[in-house]
Image (cartoon, grey):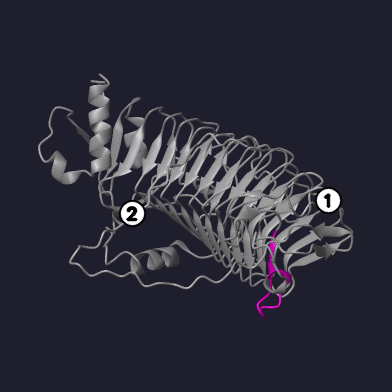
């Protein structure tokens, strides 16, 4: 192990990434003159470097392969790979029943590692083979450190989310999340954050852990730009105000356990797994701009009785796009759901929810399915184009339009009102019903389900001839790069 001299910066810019350089500048500008840079080379121990560090230090792990379980109990510590490209540093679990990294202090950053567990779905060797096949020829050192510094309180966790739908809270249906934490120790995970605040997990890749990142009663922490294969993200009970941004999850899921409040899941990509699940008793969570492909359910929420917002998500080829059970006073809008069995499913007394501006197309069974006394929901300005748009059993009393008002509706008309009702054959109510005054509203109401009516169904907009205005006057092409600013304080 090498402990660097903070005053010796020779070759610094050529070795370290911009991210690490920024951290160093911040430390010096903050007047923390005692901060150390500690280097770890193959054959040495990351745990030893942590044990020899103090608050504010930076541990830099050089390219190679390491095998150990690391407990981080030093606050304001940064542990990072040498290069910004995480392919260069591989950390394997040293013990099957412990987390690779266990974080037990605030303001810790873990960045730029390949983290491989000893999961049940495949061996670490298979995970390494998968890694090497996708790492553009990166070579790892054959040396490893078998020293194990795992916390003695770690214990085996027999539950495995990859083998079953996420567990259940009390009085919940069988496929919803439950706590996996026994209140004493972390389960087996790539990184476990245990009752900490303001930590950052970024630019890591996780393979074959029972859980990729597991949060226990953790707040104000950020998971950013991580990649997960056959393991995902699990926030256990009491996690609040965490940011999960731009993570990629393959063949797994993202779970919010019970009593989780004010978390933001933004621009994540999930595929070939179980999608996003939110358990009971929390609220004010935001699920926005996520892409969910070929999952059993896109977004699944159970027994949430406080405002949660699902907006601007793209859900494709999932059995159920959005599945709400016992959900009250939440908003579902601007989502695009296609090619599943059911677009949006409301069951077991879902009420007082608002569903608007959603596009639901090409569903095999129904665009929206209402079951078991789900009533009092406002459902308007949605675009339905399915062979069967609405299926309802034991439920009525939903509101299918708002008062007519000026504004461009989801079909391109000039007034807001109800929903657009289409089918793939071109014979849907909105496609064939007249709009004599061209106000964008059909001349007749639409009987949605027995006693429920959409009194202001949207009309098919008039066809407008396209005019080619292409000009070739030698002007160079202007590229418009859109910019999206995420407001972290969502007004519900």
In magenta segment, residue 425 = yes
Q: Nearer the viewer, residue 423 or 411?
A: 411
Q: Secondary structure at mark 1?
A: loop
Residue on which disc 1 sits: 375
**Is 487 displayed left or right of 33 in the figure?**
right
Q: Is residue 439 above or below residue 51?
A: below
Which quadrant is the N terminus positioned in?
top left
Q: Residue at x 83, y 64 (%)?
A: 447
- For residue 191, side relative to residue 310 (left or right): left
Magenta-highlighted residues: 419-430
Position of residue 282 measured from the top left corner of the image (x, y, whole percent): 68, 38
Q: Which mark is residue 125?
A: none
The residue that disc 2 covers is 481
Label 2 CA crowd tier, 10 Å (few <14, some 14–19, many 20+): few
Residue at 65%, 77% in the rendered image: 424
Quarter-of-image position of residue 431 = bottom right
Q: Residue at x 89, y 63 (%)?
A: 450
Image location (x, y in percent) of residue 237? 65, 38
Q: Is residue 293 above or below residue 179?
A: below
């Amino acid at each position: 192990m090498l402990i660097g001299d903070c005053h010796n910066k020779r070759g610094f810019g050529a070795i370290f990434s911009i991210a690490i350089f920024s951290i160093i500048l911040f430390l010096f500008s903050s007047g923390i003159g005692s901060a150390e840079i500690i280097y770890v080379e193959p054959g040495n121990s990351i745990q030893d470097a942590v044990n020899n560090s103090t608050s504010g230090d930076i541990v830099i792990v050089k390219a190679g392969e390491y095998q150990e379980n690391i407990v981080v109990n030093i606050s304001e510590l940064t542990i990072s790979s040498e290069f910004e490209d995480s392919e260069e540093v591989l950390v394997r679990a040293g013990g099957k029943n412990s987390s690779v990294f266990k974080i037990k202090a605030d303001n810790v950053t873990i960045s730029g590692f390949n983290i491989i567990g000893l999961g049940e779905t495949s061996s670490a060797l298979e995970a390494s083979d998968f890694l090497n096949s996708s790492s553009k020829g990166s070579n790892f050192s054959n040396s490893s450190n078998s020293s194990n510094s795992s916390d003695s309180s770690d214990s085996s966790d027999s539950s495995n989310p990859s083998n079953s739908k996420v567990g259940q809270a009390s009085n919940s249906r069988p496929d919803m999340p439950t706590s996996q934490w026994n209140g004493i120790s972390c389960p087996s995970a790539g990184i476990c954050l245990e009752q900490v605040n303001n930590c950052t997990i970024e630019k890591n890749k996780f393979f074959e852990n029972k859980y990729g990142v597991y949060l226990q009663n953790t707040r104000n922490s950020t998971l950013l730009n991580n990649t997960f294969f056959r393991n995902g993200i699990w926030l256990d009970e009491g996690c609040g105000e965490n940011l999960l941004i731009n993570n990629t999850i393959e063949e797994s899921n993202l779970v919010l356990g019970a009593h989780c409040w004010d978390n933001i899941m933004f621009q994540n990509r999930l595929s070939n797994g179980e999608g996003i699940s939110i358990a009971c008793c929390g609220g004010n969570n935001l699920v926005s701009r996520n892409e969910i492909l070929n999952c059993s359910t896109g977004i699944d929420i159970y027994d949430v009785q406080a405002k949660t917002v699902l907006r601007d998500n793209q859900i494709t080829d999932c059995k159920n796009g959005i599945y709400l059970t016992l959900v009250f006073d939440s908003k579902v809008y601007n989502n695009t759901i296609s090619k599943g069995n059911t677009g949006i499913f409301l069951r077991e007394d879902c009420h007082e929810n608002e569903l608007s501006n959603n596009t639901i197309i090409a569903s095999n069974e129904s665009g929206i399915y209402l079951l078991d006394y789900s009533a009092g929901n406002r459902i308007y300005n949605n675009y339905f184009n399915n062979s069967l748009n609405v299926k309802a059993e034991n439920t009525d009393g939903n509101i299918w339009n708002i008062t007519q008002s000026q504004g461009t509706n989801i079909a391109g008309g000039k007034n807001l009102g109800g929903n657009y009702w289409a089918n793939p054959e071109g014979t849907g109510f909105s496609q064939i019903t007249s709009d004599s005054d061209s106000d964008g509203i059909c001349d007749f109401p639409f009987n949605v389900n027995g006693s429920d009516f959409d009194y202001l169904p949207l009309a098919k907009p008039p066809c407008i001839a396209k005019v080619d205005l292409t000009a070739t006057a030698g002007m160079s092409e202007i590229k418009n790069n859109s910019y999206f600013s995420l407001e972290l304080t969502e007004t519900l």
